[in-house]
Image (cartoon, grey):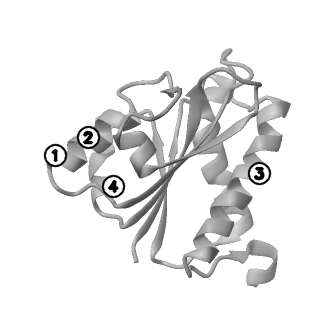
Amino acid sequence: MKTLIFGAGNLLLSDEGFGVHCLRYLQEHFVFPDSVELYDGGTLGIMVTHKFEEAELVFILDTVDTEGEPGEVFRFDRDDIMLSRLPVKLSPHQIGIQEMLLISEMRGFCPERLTLFGVIPDSLDAGHELSPTLQKSMELVACRVVEELRASGVVVRERALAA
């Protein structure tokens, strides 16, 4: 089963880069089989629609613009996203994830198993690092992704134990 972990965000706007920072955290702390692709989607938007179309299982890591406390983590499944049942506006950057998935669905290639982990940002000021609040959320989201992968039968090892 081909799996995609897609980190979205703008690394120049502190917490807006959450998805990319979380992806890097996963790369640094865990070892994934070849069937799992960790992809830095940055702010490429529609230019990377094909990545979703190549995978059977997709995890999207991003920020969400909604009411709540900074660092609060939300989890949405494919139906929540595709049927517009999200009580949030997805990330404030470029064309949205929903539009990208709609394009894939129209082409007949939208993955059936899709999960979005979104976190409320604390700061969108210029800067290359996450706020301390989102640093904590990043570890939580990374662990939740790994747990869900393992529950799907994917063997994920901690990097310290991989040697």
Quadrant showing the N terminus: bottom left
Distance (Cα) linking label 4 and label 2: 14 Å
Compare marks 3 and 4 and give the one earlier in the sequence.
4
The amino acid pointed to by label 3 is Leu
Distance (Cα) linking label 3 and label 1: 33 Å
The amino acid pointed to by label 2 is Leu
Instruction: From the viewer's perspective, tell me whether residue 77 is left or right of residue 52.
Output: right
Residue ID at (39%, 37%): 97
Mark 3 vs mark 1: in front: 1
The amino acid pointed to by label 1 is Met
Residue ID at (75%, 73%): 159
Q: Which residue lies under the disc numbered 1?
A: 106
Compare marks 3 and 1 and give the one earlier in the sequence.
1
Q: Secondary structure at mark 4?
A: helix
Q: Which residue lies under the disc numbered 3?
A: 140
Q: Residues within 10 Å of mark 3 (few under 14, many from 20)?
A: few
Quadrant showing the C terminus: bottom right
Q: Report x, y in % for residue 47.
A: 28, 40
Distance (Cα) linking label 2 and label 1: 6 Å
Q: Secondary structure at mark 1?
A: helix
Q: Report x, y in % for residue 79.
A: 40, 48
